[in-house]
Image (cartoon, rainbow, N blue to C red):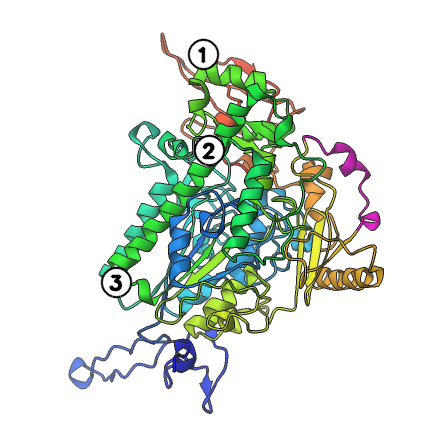
Amino acid sequence: MWMFSCLLLGPILAQGEDPSVANGELTPPDLPFPPMPSKAVVGPTLADSVNSWPPKRKPLKEDAPNILLIMNDDVGYGAPETFGGPIHTPTLSKVAQHGVSYNRFHTTAICSPTRAFLLTGRNSHNVGAGQITEAASGFPGYTGTIPKSAATLAKVLSGYGYDTAAFGKWHNTPVDDLMKSGPFDQYPTGLGFSYFYGFLAGETSQYNPRLYENTNPIEPPRKPEEGYHLTEDMADQAIKFIRANRALTPDRPFFIYFAPGGAHGPHHVHKEWADKYKGKFDMGWEKLRNITFEKQKAMGWIPNSTKLTPIDPTMVKWKEIPEEQRAFQLRLMEVYAGYLEHTDTQDGKVVEELERQGLFNNTLIIYVLGDNGASAEGIHGTIDELLAENALPSAYQQQMEVLNRDFGGLDALGSQHVDKMYHSSWAWALDTPFKSTKLVAAHFGGMRTPMVMSWPKVIKHDPTPRSQFHHVCDIAPTIYEAVGVQFPTRVEGAKQMPLDGVSMVYTWNNVSVKERKSAQYFEVMGSRGVYKDGWFASVFGPRIPWAEANETRMREWNPDTDVWELYDLTRDFSQAEDLAKEMPDQVAKMKQIFLMEATANKVLPIGAGLYTIYYHPEEGPHSPLTEWKLYEGLTRIAESNAPGFHSGQNSLATIDVEISANASGVLYCVGGTAGVVASSTRLKQKSTATSPNPRLPCSLEPERSR
């Protein structure tokens, strides 16, 4: 009879070598383990002594699995071809065809909190990650600093003997730590990863990325003109890590966190990838959504009883797009589709290396398609996402004038010259069959994502999707149970808070088993919800992500007067029927459950995630300096530690410089291409220049927050 090998193994810690084994019972250990006793004999002289190396502690069995954890960025539930969508995702399909898939798996609706959930196994507010790091505040659930009491997967697994590495987007380091002098305890290497290659912010250019290797800022190994693309580079680096592990430490399993940052904006991909999708979206977003919905039902990915939710009244319909603008909107979507396929293909290069090395069968692969739903932050479609995110005018005619005059027309979309984002209604279509998008914690469009797991040695392939309600905080407990490690009571002296997640191992070979997760809260900037035993109650919140301006809503918002929605998820897969008016008692019960969860997990006060990003930006993370003395060669200063070049704020730059005859060049530059702000001048000796009043928040290091 086939059984889980992890259950057959029992505790994989070696008896007699682990101090946590007492009286035949296994108790959670402290990490690091104490040293093994030496058998060396020490006498007065070498002739009287016997050399003996202390035995190496072996807390893992030899067949402990390797672990590959993949998570892409800003991808909707209805995007992948694997599960009925329009975009080719061969790697997602490959992993699913060797394992099992989950159609009721959830993230948060925003970047940093999802990653904190994922890496710690605790609720994000509970570890200070209730908001993106750039918008942190002093409220306990929003500090942007993961406490020592919440050791990450990497920290725990490395303590048990795993080689650990992270590649790609991080977005969990406090922005005021982004200095060459540190501190580095909140960098990936400070939180358990022995190696890191990627970027620390929420996004970066795929052609000119602001790269880090471990704690060191580095420049890309090649130029865009030489064919460089960041996601390809990260796949190559991950492959090098695997090969180094096999060559030098084949006795150690590895844990790789591969989070490339695609398909978050800016949507950057080489033209040939976007060209694959020419004409594929000409029907517009409503019809695309209908096609995807029928495919999802036909393949059994969603229940046949699922209802397709309608377009929100505040969203733009395809028929409202003027004919002369449609080529622009279609190309924006074609580029996104090519970018997602390209990202999934790079994920696949890492999987292919496992096959080449003969490691695939004993590697637990967990592929989370997106850290949240598709993003509506492009609003009406833009060649510069920061224009849209800052609610600045970006009329179609102006954008096309710039594209045609400076960059060669629509073919520039996807290139290094523009930081494009598609129309928000494409995001809605890619979140089929749900309502809303990224940044909304009330509807599953923002936070339900396909997830697949494979481990051929242990998990028997089954094409029927698992429909138990689970969350990204359940990944860490799943890995701990799969590997067989005991979660430590202390790590490096810090007492550990309990895990909030629930292991999913019980679902691997039993598709109909009763779910073990009874409750989970959700919250993003005042948008919120709570799940309890099949019921879901939620509030949309003050911000409409796809609206150009939210000033009035934000100014007048009072969470005490928010209107709650109620859904019976046992009958309503897509949140199509709001039962709040019919069942006020159940609403009241769910509101109380949310309040208890919010109190226990440091979510309060409601709206704290808006405090520094909207209500009091002057109290957000920033340098305490009011005057900077910068020297030649000083580069890569992060926005939070740089002079505050912001709209409505004047800055004076006094430059003392000796200039040779006929010299020209940049004296200082603020921001990257997307910032549309740079100061480049030919100045006389000891001249003074006053900066322009920039249109956008920008930085000496052009990394952005979402």
Q: Residue furthest top?
A: 662
The mark found on residue 358 in the picture is: 3
**Quadrant assignment, res 60:** bottom left
Q: Crowding near pointer 3: few (<14 within 10 Å), some, many (20+)?
A: few
Q: Nearer the viewer, residue 655 or 376?
A: 376
Where residue 295 appears, as percent x and y from the top left, is: 51, 49
Residue at mark 3 to residue at mark 2: CA–CA distance: 36 Å
Sequence-first disc among 1 and 3: 3
Given residues 681 and 379, the one toward you in this image is 379
Vertically, is 61 above or below 148? below
The percent position of residue 118, horizontal first and vertical second, equals: 52, 58
Q: Which residue in the structure is indicated by mark 2? A: 334
N-terminal of the pair, mark 1 or mark 2, is: 2
Q: What SS does tag 2 mark?
A: helix
Q: Secondary structure at mark 1?
A: loop
Q: Residues within 10 Å of mark 2 (few under 14, many from 20)?
A: many
Name the residue type under label 2.
Answer: Glu
Q: Farthest residue toward the left? A: 47
Q: Which residues are magenta?
A: 548-563
Disc 1/disc 2 C-alpha distance (Å): 41 Å
Image check: 565 left or right of 70? right
Report the label total: 3
Along the line of sight, the residue nearer the viewer: 690 or 50:
690
